[in-house]
Image (cartoon, rainbow, N blue to C red):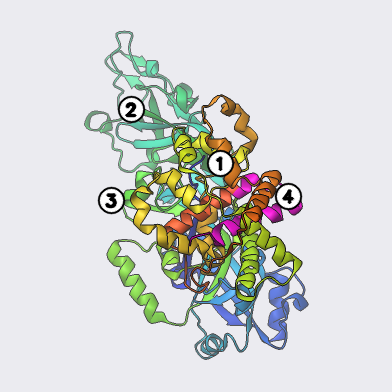
């Protein structure tokens, strides 16, 4: 068995949280000349592609800006330029226009997202939507009268990335936060030269990180193989091991009466994992106004010619997988000064977070999210892989004000919490991170159809050949696994038992499942079993689907079995006693065994009926029933073999749930 996996996060971004400089907003495009201009200049298409039909109005939206131009938005989320360039089309492929994110029924949208584009000069995503004149009448009226309409956007991200904005890059105008730089800006290289930034991009890195601290400079984190300018420890020490003390601003060491030569000749590009405590880093002095002539005697660094020299006093190591790396390419010298360190092209961001409660999230997000440090740095999150699926008109600003006040009292405006409060529905096609989700979703839909067939029999009786076939399956579904067999199964490890059950094509009925899980007397769930049985009879999967609870159930892979790898576990050598054999006779989905059970029940004269449980409209099933549903989907995924036999397996699984057993 495996544990339940994280399936990413849903984030909600409101238009009034986007930085004002983005000029996020909407305007109607009723004039043909304006439509033609936007088609040509912004969306690179023909005007006919943007022109709405008689029932819709075209609206041009400036949605959100990229991080490189505008930094974090007001809830401390950001969308890097590359994410905007690569992912803006997901608005069109997955999105639609709704009101208040009532988006579960995609056919009840207020409009469609026709085109998307990344506006390079403005650094923002722009959309062309068609809003229905009647469905969106209230919002269109407001837009026409005031020129403004509030909207919000929902996206799903597999993870976000901790980013401590404000890493100071030395430029001709002084220190500038790295997030404020753009291609074409100038920075200062390790030689003190004015050099142009030629590229800004992201990549990923797996391996060792080195966090290097230097007295008087601070610390920086680099990939293990990343080159950084350093002066080897031996260059600044006498044979006795004593550290040279330079005359400030010169190459001369008075105590030893020697000239060390130019520091740029002594400094070498060294991989971060080869830097040692005692080595030194260099920074051009003339660009550091805080460094005075007396620096060598009054501060924790000294000046070697025109450079400040600081000593490495601590090195820490850590390991990461698929960590996004922020790259800054500089012309000619290919270096820049970051946080006082002369480095070569890149600065490493911190950590990936897979969910809001990810136990492995870094302390920056956990403890400092949205906070401004004394040095002006701000901690927020980058979203590198957003999939946009919903844009909604928001018509009740008072609700937004109340929500803002609530979040402000908590310290941050959290986009994840906003999405939870809005009850946003994530389209099933976006769920790709949980193994088996799509297979379980397909099984759920088949189970819903089969439940409808059994409900038809319960209400109208047996009328067709299909009804007679389903009624015969009810006979096979009356059996439960005897307590003695369950007791034997409980003596082995659960993962081994689940694999052996899958190998034998056994799907436990609800009573057998809870006896196996909690004990023959049902343990702590004994008092809950009547309500669990009722909700399983349900119809269980119809209620899950209608309430939306099926998504969580399909994501639960705790009971999943890798049947392809089962032989690796040597299951045949385990001592299951007669447990598996007896369980097969009662609950196996093997065709021959099912047929034998039907014959036995027929000979005994049993004619089981469909048990009516709770209503489809009663909301989500209780927790115990949901756990059983998760198990049943995992078991069915293991035993179904395709074709007509799979249809029979699905029908039999429903019969197990809905059969009215003898004596009930």
Q: Mark 3 points at which residue?
A: 374
Q: What element carries label 1?
A: helix
Dot 1 or dot 4, earlier in sequence: 1
Of tags 1 and 3, the one toward the viewer is 1
Q: Distance between the residues labelled 3 and 4?
A: 63 Å
Q: Residue at x 62, y 48 (%)?
A: 637
Q: Is mark 4 on a helix, strand or loop?
A: loop
Q: What stretch is highlighted in magenta?
A: 636-664
Q: Residue at x 37, y 64 (%)?
A: 413
Q: How crowded is mark 2: few (under 14 residues within 10 Å), some or many (20 or more)?
A: some
Q: Do the residues labelled 1 and 4 touch (CB within 8 Å)?
A: no
Q: Is residue 141 toward the left or the right of residue 297 in the image?
A: right
Residue 452, percent from left and from top = 63, 69
Residue 341, percent from left and from top = 41, 36
Dot 3 or dot 4, earlier in sequence: 3
Dot 2 or dot 4, earlier in sequence: 2
Q: Are marks 2 and 3 in contact (CB under 8 Å)?
A: no
Q: Is residue 386 visible?
A: yes
Position of residue 172 relative to residue 222, above or below, is below
Q: How far apart are marks 1 and 3 (CA)?
A: 66 Å
Q: Can residue 85 be seen in this view?
A: no
Q: Does the magenta stretch include residue 176?
A: no
Dot 2 or dot 3, earlier in sequence: 2
Q: Distance between the residues labelled 2 and 4?
A: 60 Å
Image quadrant assignment for residue 308: top left
Of tags 1 and 4, the one toward the viewer is 1
Q: Which mark is residue 471?
A: none
Q: Residue 583 carries which label?
A: 1
Q: Mark 4 points at which residue?
A: 642
Dot 1 or dot 3, earlier in sequence: 3
Q: What element carries label 2?
A: strand
Dot 2 or dot 1, earlier in sequence: 2
């Amino acid at each position: 068995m495996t544990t339940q996996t994280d399936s990413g996060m849903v984030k909600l971004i409101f238009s009034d949280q986007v930085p004002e400089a983005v000029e996020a907003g909407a305007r109607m495009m009723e004039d043909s000349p304006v439509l033609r201009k936007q088609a040509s200049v912004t969306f690179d298409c023909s005007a006919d592609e943007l022109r709405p039909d008689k029932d819709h109005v075209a609206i041009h939206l400036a949605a959100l800006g990229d991080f490189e131009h505008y930094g974090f938005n007001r809830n401390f989320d950001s969308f890097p330029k590359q994410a905007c360039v690569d992912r803006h089309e997901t608005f069109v492929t997955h999105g639609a226009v709704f009101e208040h994110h009532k988006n579960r029924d995609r056919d009840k949208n207020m409009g469609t997202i026709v085109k998307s584009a990344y506006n390079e000069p403005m650094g923002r995503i722009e959309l062309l939507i068609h809003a229905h004149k009647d469905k969106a009448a209230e919002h269109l009226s407001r837009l026409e009268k005031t020129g403004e309409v509030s909207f919000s956007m929902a996206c799903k991200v597999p993870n976000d990335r901790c980013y401590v904005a404000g890493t100071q890059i030395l430029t001709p105008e002084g220190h500038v936060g790295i997030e404020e730089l753009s291609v074409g800006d100038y920075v200062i290289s390790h030689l003190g030269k004015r050099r142009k930034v030629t590229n800004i991009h992201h990549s990923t890195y797996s391996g060792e990180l080195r966090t290097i601290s230097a007295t008087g400079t601070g610390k920086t984190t680099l990939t293990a193989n990343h080159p950084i300018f350093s002066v080897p420890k031996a260059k600044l020490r006498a044979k006795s091991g004593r550290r040279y003390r330079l005359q400030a601003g010169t190459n001369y060491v008075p105590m030893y009466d020697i000239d060390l030569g130019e520091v740029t000749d002594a400094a070498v590009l060294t991989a971060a994992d080869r830097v040692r405590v005692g080595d030194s880093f260099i920074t051009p002095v003339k660009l550091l106004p805080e460094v005075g002539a007396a620096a060598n005697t009054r501060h924790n660094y000294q000046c070697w010619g025109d450079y400040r020299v600081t000593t490495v006093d601590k090195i820490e190591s850590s390991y990461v997988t698929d960590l996004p790396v922020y790259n800054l390419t500089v012309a000619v010298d290919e270096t820049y000064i970051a946080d006082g360190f002369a480095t070569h092209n890149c600065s490493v961001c911190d950590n990936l977070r897979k969910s809001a409660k990810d136990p492995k999230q870094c302390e920056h997000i956990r403890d400092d999210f949205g906070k401004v440090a004394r040095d002006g740095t701000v901690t927020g999150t980058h979203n590198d892989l957003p999939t946009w699926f919903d844009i909604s008109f928001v018509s009740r600003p008072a609700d937004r004000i109340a929500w803002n006040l609530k979040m402000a009292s908590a310290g941050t405006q959290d986009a994840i919490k906003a999405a939870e409060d809005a009850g946003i529905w994530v389209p099933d096609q976006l769920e790709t991170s949980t193994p088996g989700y799509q297979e379980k979703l397909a099984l759920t839909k088949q189970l819903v159809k089969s439940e409808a067939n059994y409900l038809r029999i319960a209400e109208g009786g047996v009328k067709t050949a299909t009804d007679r076939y389903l009624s015969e399956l009810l006979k096979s579904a009356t059996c439960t696994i005897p307590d003695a067999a369950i007791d034997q199964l409980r003596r082995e490890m659960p993962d081994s038992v689940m694999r052996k059950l899958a190998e034998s094509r056994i799907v436990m009925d609800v009573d057998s499942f809870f006896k196996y899980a909690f004990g023959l007397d049902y343990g702590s769930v004994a008092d809950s079993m009547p309500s669990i049985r009722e909700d399983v009879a349900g119809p269980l999967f119809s209620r899950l689907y209608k309430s939306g609870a099926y998504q969580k159930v399909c994501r639960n892979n705790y009971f999943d079995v890798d049947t392809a790898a089962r032989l690796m576990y040597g299951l045949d050598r385990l001592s299951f006693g007669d447990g598996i054999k007896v369980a097969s006779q009662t609950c196996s989905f093997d065709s021959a065994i099912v047929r034998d059970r039907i014959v036995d029940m027929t000979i005994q004269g049993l004619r089981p009926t469909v048990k009516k449980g709770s209503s489809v409209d009663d909301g989500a099933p209780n927790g115990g029933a949901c756990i059983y549903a998760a198990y049943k989907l995992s078991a069915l995924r293991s035993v179904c073999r395709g074709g007509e036999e799979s249809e029979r397996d699905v029908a039999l699984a429903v019969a197990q749930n809905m059969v009215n057993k003898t004596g009930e």
